[in-house]
């Protein structure tokens, strides 16, 4: 979508869903804003239901007047009913906003300047509520140049430290195209014949296992050749 981006991040240090969001402006109808946040939540594939979320959002929302464990009262702005959709999303995704807590945030928290010159806190970083952090520092950067003709946005930054358990991922073996010329087909006479009295699923499993064992020797991969004829033999050897 032009207004949000959902990325899957999976490496030995972190496994999470990264959500970049640009919510409708405050001039939109409250019902439209609420539906937009619901649509964003629905766009996250259900197979990642148990994964942590990290939110990077231009939320266009005024929060902090009703503090809780998700949103603090630091530099709170007057309550706006149009922030309900954003707050519901934060609650449902199990997030908290470091810039709204005084023990995390340093300096002013305003990120967007209205054409009349007033600054508001529109942009937030949301972190998983259950993360145990040894350090968390939030601030608004005035050093990042976003290349605008006039300055009306500043980036919220959060630096965290936490202990993690490394994730280990087993890489699947690459699929191999099998041809009859690659094997000694005489070995197929060694394939065990399943009992026809067993059910079809057990029959198929037994047959597959027996064939795999009989043809256990994997074919040797052919020598790789360049896709482009313009590469010389010397160049190919270097590659």
Image (cartoon, grey):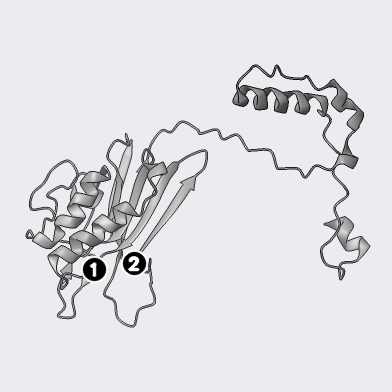
Residue at the location (91% across, 28% down)? Answer: 186
In the figure, is residue 125 to the left or right of 168? left
Q: Earlier in the sequence, mark 2 or mark 1?
A: 2
| Label 2: which secondary element | loop
In this figure, which residue is indicated by the disc labeled 2?
3
On the image, which quarter does residue 237 sit in?
bottom right
Q: Quadrant of the C terminus?
A: bottom right
For this orientation, the residue located farthest to the front is 197
Residue at the location (8% across, 53% down)? Answer: 65
Indicate whether 171 appears above or below 64.
above
Instruction: Tell me the crowding category of disc 1: few under 14, some 14 to 19, or many 20 or more residues within 10 angstroms, Cα based.
Output: some
Q: Position of residue 160 (x, y in %)?
A: 35, 44
Instruction: Tell me the crowding category of disc 2: few under 14, some 14 to 19, or many 20 or more residues within 10 angstroms, Cα based.
Output: few
Residues at circles 2 and 1 in contact by the CB criterion of under 8 Å: yes
User: Which mark, residue 24?
Assistant: 1
Q: Quadrant of the N terminus?
A: bottom left
Indicate whether 186 appears above or below 145.
above
Q: Can the viewer see residue 158? A: no
Residue at the location (78% across, 19% down)? Answer: 192
- Find the distance from the CA under tag 2 to the CA under tag 1: 8 Å
Which sits in the foreground, 75 or 16? 16
Which sits in the foreground, 41 or 145? 41
Q: Position of residue 122 (x, y in %)?
A: 22, 64
On the image, which quarter does residue 155 sit in?
bottom left
Q: Position of residue 117 (x, y in %)?
A: 16, 78
In the figure, is residue 144 to the left or right of 30? right
| Label 1: which secondary element | loop
How many numbered callouts?
A: 2
């Amino acid at each position: 979508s032009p207004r949000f981006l959902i990325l899957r991040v999976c490496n030995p240090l972190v496994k999470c869903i990264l959500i970049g969001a640009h919510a409708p402006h405050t001039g939109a109808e409250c019902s439209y804003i609420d539906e937009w946040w619901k649509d964003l939540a629905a766009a996250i594939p259900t197979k990642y239901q148990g994964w942590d979320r990290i939110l990077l959002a231009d939320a266009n929302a005024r929060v902090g007047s009703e503090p809780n464990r998700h949103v603090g009262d630091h530099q709170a702005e007057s309550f706006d009913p149009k922030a309900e959709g954003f707050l519901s999303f934060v609650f449902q995704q199990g997030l908290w906003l470091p810039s709204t807590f005084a023990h995390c945030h340093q300096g002013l928290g305003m990120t967007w300047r209205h054409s009349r010159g007033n600054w508001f806190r529109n942009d937030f970083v949301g972190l998983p509520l259950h993360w145990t952090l040894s350090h968390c520092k939030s601030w608004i950067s005035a050093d990042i140049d976003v290349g605008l003709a006039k300055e009306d946005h500043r980036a919220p930054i959060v630096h965290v430290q936490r202990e993690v358990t490394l994730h280990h991922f087993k890489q699947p073996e690459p699929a191999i195209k099998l041809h009859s010329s690659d094997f000694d087909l005489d070995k197929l006479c060694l394939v065990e014949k399943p009992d026809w009295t067993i059910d079809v699923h057990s029959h198929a499993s037994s047959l597959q296992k027996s064939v795999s064992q009989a043809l256990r020797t994997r074919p040797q991969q052919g020598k790789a050749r360049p896709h482009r004829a313009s590469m010389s033999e010397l160049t190919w050897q270097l590659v």
